[in-house]
Image (cartoon, rainbow, N blue to C red):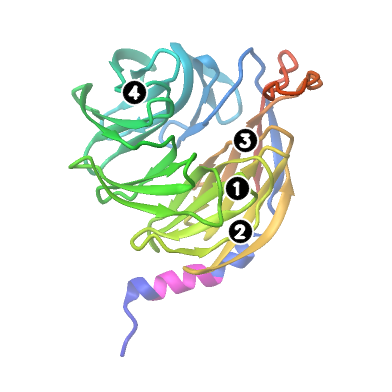
Amino acid sequence: MRMPFARLASLLLLAAAPAQAQGVHLLQTLKVGGPGGWDYVTLDSAHHRLYVPRFDRVMVLDLDGKTVGTLPGTEGVHGVALAPDLDRGFTSNGRSQSVTIFRPSTLKVIGHMKATGAGPDAILYDSFTRRVFSFNGQGKDITAYDAEKGTVVGAIPLGHKPEFAVADGKGRIFVNLEDASQVAAIDAQTLKVLHIWPLAPVEEPSGMAMDRLHRRLFIVGRNKLMAVMDADSGKVVATPAIGAGADAAAFDSGTGTAYSSNGEGTLTVVRQDAPDAYAVLAQAPTQRGARTMALDETTHRLYLPTADFEPAPPRKPGEPWQRPALVPDSFRILVVGR
């Protein structure tokens, strides 16, 4: 029997991946500066820009690190979602429990929407339904918005803390439940929870990425493991080892390579040999604090924000851990690639 073309193309891509994935290293450091922490960085391939949340604003940079604009008034901002088909962008503002709407073409703010739960964190645009979803960590729910009208469509209670999420482009959304070490599969049209899947042995999941062709989810956990999950059955098919402090995952469909950005100062490079077979190629050095990232699938480069840190304050018994203060004006973007 003749092999279907799509299957043959898939096998050829996987065969080419090992050579393409090797030699990942730091290419450039973009000095940015400015006050404030950061969270999820988003790459706009159409405009060759990076959106970088900085607590009370979003810095918009070109891919050389130069500031081209700012989105103000985004208190406690965590992430940015882009809807290129609508020329709209959205920011998740954790402190003000809101979403800011802007136009990427002009960087002009055009509206605001109120979330149904406290602490909007990750944010996602689903092109299949033309809806935006904010994942409200403190409220333990998801708010769905009409991306074109700028109105709330509904809410999805979860009972657990949602972390990062991805859409499959066919009306399904997958979101990590951090405090339960689970993944929820959501119908983006009906706003119903379809499945709740366990992630064991991965614990405290944070970042997530997806291989849409092979229907595989890449989920990084705080216990130095990545779960590769079948997006249709919920089965964990592989658990490659990653570095400590992972907060983001990425998958490059052009090279068949998955990545985990680890706050300890490493980037885990995972080669996809087959849909259910994965090998760790490297723990490439980055810099301490480089825990989130954005992937440019055109150039196969990764952009990781970080900064220098002051010495950690003394911790007394019974007191919670406190993040060390940033060295003023040390914020930068690391560019990693081959």
Q: What stretch of residues is rendered in magenta?
A: 8-15
Q: Which residue is mark 2?
A: 270
Tag 1 secondary structure: strand
**Which is more toward the observer, 212 or 177?**
177
Q: Which residue is mark 3?
A: 304
Badge 1 amino acid: Ser
Task: Name the N-terminal-most of marks 3 and 4.
Answer: 4
Left or right, 44 with respect to 128, comes to right
Q: How many marks?
A: 4
Badge 4 amino acid: Gly
Name the disc covering residue 260, or none.
1
Nearer mark to the viewer, of 1 and 4: 4
| Quarter of the figure that contains the N terminus | bottom left
Badge 2 amino acid: Val
| Placement of 132 over or under 26, stated as above or below | above
Tag 4 secondary structure: loop
